[in-house]
Amino acid sequence: MVVWLILIIVLCIGFDFINGFHDAANSIATVVSTRVLTPVQAVIWSAFFNFVAFFIAKYIIGEFGVADTVSKTVMVEKLTAAGIDFLPVVFAGLLAAIIWNLFTWMMGIPSSSSHTLIGGLAGSAIAAYGFEAVHTEIILTIVAFIFVAPIIGFLAGNIIMALTLNLCRRAKPHKADKWFKLAQLVSSALLSIGHGLNDSQKEMGIIAATIMSITAAGAELPEWVAMSDMSELHDWIPIACFTAIAAGTMSGGWKIMKTMGNKITKITPIEGFCSQIAGSITLFITQTFKVPVSTTHVISGSIMGVGAIKRLSAVRWGVTIEMVTAWILTIPVSAVIAMVVYSIVKLFL
């Protein structure tokens, strides 16, 4: 059990790292495309605020609500009651999620790291026990937010852009650009905090669920590891996850950044600022309701909303349709990959 636990923790931290460089573009693409920061400066800026999110969750919000939701995605008690070891299920789900994440990164597709993780866990659990192994209500909520999150981002981006243009209608374009370039530093920081708050917690939830399953099985674990519920979450778990995603962000994500930065719509400083503020607001709202959403979906919707304020044709809808197709496919494809991986893992157990 200890070997499995160590392996799962390593995979979770590895996935967090991959999540960081896979989703780095979400927070910094507009800052780079408007030349507020160089790519290197941008990833360092974003990584710093990814980690700052830990202190906000720990000392200001006072809980890790998204982690709690993710920890309940799979019905661990049903698997345990049926005599099915939860650890290979988690391992297969994580491995499937990593495979899909790396594939979409190499292809430059801005898919959701969050949803590939949920899909991977659900798929391996279904392969092990059936559809009763997953918490249907949580899964359906997450699936619903594939559409809800970008719509909220779109509307927020549209409204914020309209208000900002109205407030700045008398400003000189050159002066306005200068101020909004500076303002983008703040909006990018807020978006990076939202990214850290949302995405780091998913792997925390998996590590916590794994430790709780081992503790419930009666295995003796060190005091600094053992836990029976989320209220006993040890600090080393969020610190490790937030550090990993920050390190991943620093490693970049240039292919997806190109799509997010300019392929959806042409971005100016004012549009970059508005889209990031809209994305941040959306992420803070979903964090409040403990819903694990995709930062990719959120910022994409925000960029579309900002671009559409000029005219609908300003948004390159062909690129958007390709992205939405990838979003819809992510959970089922990840689930199928996890089913295959779990079947292979079972051959060696």
Image (spheres, grey):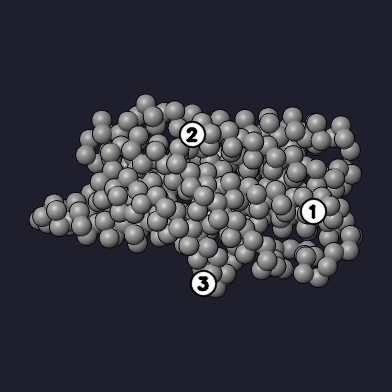
Residue 116 visible: yes
Residue shown at 45%/37% (left/top)? 255
- Does 43 sit above or below residue 112? below
Which comes before the other along the chain, label 2 or label 1? 1
Could you tell me which quadrant the C terminus lies in? top right
- Which residue in the protein does label 3 denote? 60
Distance CA(mark 2)–CA(mark 3): 34 Å
**In the drawing, what numbered circle is on residue 236?**
none
Task: Name the residue located 71 percent from the left edge and 52 percent from the top edge.
Answer: 10
Relative image position of residue 215 (x, y in whole percent): 83, 60
**Discs 2/3, front:** 2
Kindly identify which residue carries mark 2: 109
Q: Residues within 10 Å of mark 1 (few under 14, many from 20)?
A: some
Q: Is residue 155 visible?
A: no
Residue at 58% from the left image edge and 38% from the top image edge: 101
The disc placed on residue 5 is 1
Q: In front here: 130 or 313?
A: 313
- Residue type at mark 1? Leu
Q: Earlier in the sequence, mark 2 or mark 3?
A: 3
Q: Earlier in the sequence, mark 1 or mark 3?
A: 1
Q: Is residue 154 above or below residue 285?
A: above
- SS type, badge 2: loop
Residue 101 as seen in the image, left or right of residue 230: left
